[in-house]
Image: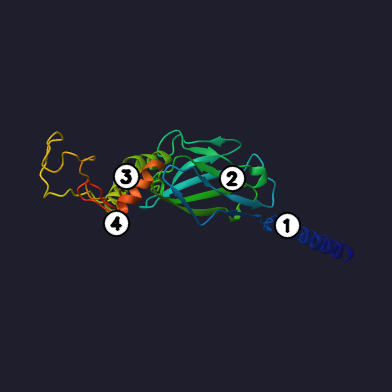
Amino acid sequence: MCKMRRLCRSRSALDVLVLLCWAVCLAPSPVFSISVNTPAELHASKGDTVTLSCTFTSTKTPTSKMSVDWSYRPQTGGPPLTFFHFSSRAFLPNEGQFNGRIQWRGSPARGDVSVALINATLTDNGTYTCSVRNPPDVHGSPNSHTVLTVTPKAPSIRFSDVAVLLAFILLPSAVITLILIGRMLCPKKHYNQSRAHRSPIEVTEGEEYAMNPPVKRATCCDLYFMDSEDEDEYYDLKKRPSVEEGFAESRC
């Protein structure tokens, strides 16, 4: 009877041990997660170098098993195209749309897996996806998307263009404007058409003893210069103006 009891107890203990082993083997392993982040949108002009930024956080230090993939889906739609892969080293595209236009700028030890797109074109518009795997961190949010919009570059005015514009357009216009202003302020003098043109050696009656040739009527734009010796004669003439001697006073 005692032997039977001992045998039952040993079998019960064995059954419990087997159940514990099964429980340990079937229990789920610890879950590790990774988080990948990229900007939602990026804007660039045609010909620019665009940095496709991507960072990640992981509970495990990056090892040689870590991998990074960048893929592109055109704005017009279609399947995504993987154009960059990193696993211990960077594998750049050697054909297709991004051949020779991708640079690796990441530092996995710092959680940075960014790449640069050189000489952006309008055909580069679309969605770019950054995927990071760092076993055992394979859960969480290993992917992140960013939308790139490339627009034509706005025309810029260079200094040489401004100089040409000033030389060929503004300066001639300024000269013409000054000439017109001068003509308006000092109008052309009109000669008395009632007097016939006469030769300088022609002498008419009453002019044999004229000391000075006939002069035209003075205007506001005429300036008279005289020596101090002539001032007395000028003031005498001013008191007794003589038309026959050809003097005329300005009415400015």
Q: Nearer the viewer, residue 171 or 226?
A: 226
Q: Nearer the viewer, mark 4 or mark 1?
A: 4
Q: CA distance from mark 4 to mark 2?
A: 90 Å
Q: Amino acid at mark 1?
A: Val
- Front: mark 4 or 3: 4
Residue corresponding to mark 1 = 24
Q: Earlier in the sequence, mark 3 or mark 1?
A: 1
**CB under 8 Å between discs 3 and 1:** no
Classify residue 155 as left or right of residue 183: right
Residue that badge 3 annotates: 175
Q: Is residue 183 visible?
A: yes
Q: Mark 3 or mark 1: which is in front?
A: 3
Quick check: 135 above or below 6? above
Q: Which residue is mark 2?
A: 113
Disc 4 vs disc 2: which is toward the camera? 4
Q: Residue 31, image x and y in percent?
A: 66, 56
Residue 191 at x, y percent in the picture: 17, 48
Which amino acid does the dot numbered 3 rest on? Val
CA neighbours of label 1 inside 10 A, class few (<14), some (14 to 19), many (20+): few
Check disc 2: other Cα within 10 Å, few if <14, some if 14-19, many if 20+.
Answer: many
Front of the two marks 1 and 2: 2
Query: Relative to 15, is 234 above or below?
Result: above
